[in-house]
Image: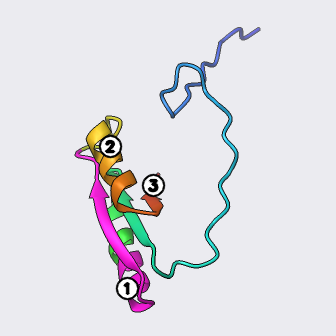
Amino acid sequence: MNTSTVTLHDPTSEAAPVNRPRRRPPPSLDGRTVALFDIGKSRAGEFLDHLAARLRARGVTTARFAKPTNAKPATAAILGDIAAGADIVVEALAD
């Protein structure tokens, strides 16, 4: 009989995860800034470049942000810059 144990880790790095209600998307992107956040995964920049071009073609303002590496959480400074400079965030994930 196999008695192995599986350990699951919370990817949010929260010691006590909190359930948060999903925020409703805005009715429009008009007048809003969309943060394009590269977390350092392979080809994330390519995806965000394409998305930025499509958003700009629709007249949407974008701002780019990036973590220095995918191996560490985003710094408080990066998260603060995103919060101060954008209304909406698109995070480029991979894998």
The residue type indicated by label 1 comes to: Arg
Q: Which residue is mark 1?
A: 56
The residue type indicated by label 2 comes to: Asn
Q: Which residue is mark 2?
A: 70
Of mark 1 and mark 3, the one earlier in the sequence is 1
Q: CA distance from mark 3 to mark 2?
A: 10 Å
Q: Which residue is mark 3?
A: 93
Where's the N terminus, which quadrant?
top right
The residue type indicated by label 3 comes to: Leu
The stretch drawn in magenta includes residue 77 = no
Q: Which residues are magenta?
A: 50-68
Q: Position of residue 83 (x, y in %)?
A: 39, 52
Image: 90 above or below 51: above
Graded by Cα atoms within 10 Å as few (under 14), some (14 to 19) or many (20 or more), the crowding at tag 3 reads: some
Q: Secondary structure at mark 1?
A: helix
Between marks 1 and 2 in the image, the one whose residue lies nearer the viewer: 1
